[in-house]
Image (spheres, helix red, strand yellow):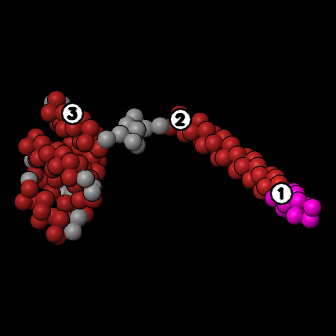
Amino acid sequence: MAKEEKTEDIEEIQTKMMSEYFRSKAREHKKLKKVMDKVEKNKKSVVETRQPFQPVTSPTADPCDVLHSIETKLMDNQNDSELIGIMDFLIPVVIGMFTSSPHWLVRDKAIDCLRSINRKMGRSLIDKHLNTVSKKQKVVLENLL
């Protein structure tokens, strides 16, 4: 008889402990869900406020595609004065992609783009921007062009 009471008491205690455990987990889940809903709501509001000001090229675009489009525009465009103005802004970006990209495809595409600029517009336009890189990178770029 005493053994049965002990097992009933143990089962009752275990039941109470388990119910308390599940209640605490349910409270944690409810709090976490509220926080996640707030985070999601904030993300949506940030996206909505940024939408009108999105750039033409999305920031998640493949850099190789961007470099390829620059290269094709360079080959197609015949208006040199407008092209020089545009390339004056883009050459530092292309050099930066070459010197700092961890991916070899981006570096290869950047050097191809710089070679196209060199063929189309001459070395002087690129040399003007090479002062911003280190001597070692400058030597590498000069050898590759």
- What residue is at 87 percent from the left and 64 percent from the top? 3
User: Which is nearer the eye, 17 or 132?
Assistant: 17
Q: Which of the marked residues, 2 or 1, is nearer the chain's N terminus?
A: 1
- What residue is at 40 percent from the left and 34 percent from the top? 56
Q: Position of residue 83 (x, y in %)?
A: 21, 38
Q: Please name the amino acid that badge 2 sits on.
A: Gln
Q: Which of the marked residues, 3 or 2, is nearer the chain's N terminus?
A: 2
Q: Please name the amino acid that badge 3 sits on.
A: Lys
Q: Residues within 10 Å of mark 3 (few under 14, many from 20)?
A: few
Front label number (1 vs 3): 1
Q: On screen, 128 above or below 106?
A: below
- What residue is at 8 percent from the left and 43 percent from the top? 119
Q: Mark 2 points at which residue?
A: 51
Q: What element carries label 3?
A: helix
- What residue is at 40 percent from the left and 38 percent from the top? 58
Front label number (2 vs 1): 1
Q: Where is residue 35 in the image (x, y as percent from the top left)?
A: 70, 49
Q: Name the residue under label 3.
A: 73
Give the magenta range.
Answer: 1-14
Q: Are marks 2 and 1 in contact (CB under 8 Å)?
A: no
Q: Mark 1 points at which residue?
A: 11
Q: Which of the marked residues, 1 or 3, is nearer the chain's N terminus?
A: 1
Q: Do the residues labelled 1 and 3 touch (CB within 8 Å)?
A: no
The image quadrant of residue 63 is top left
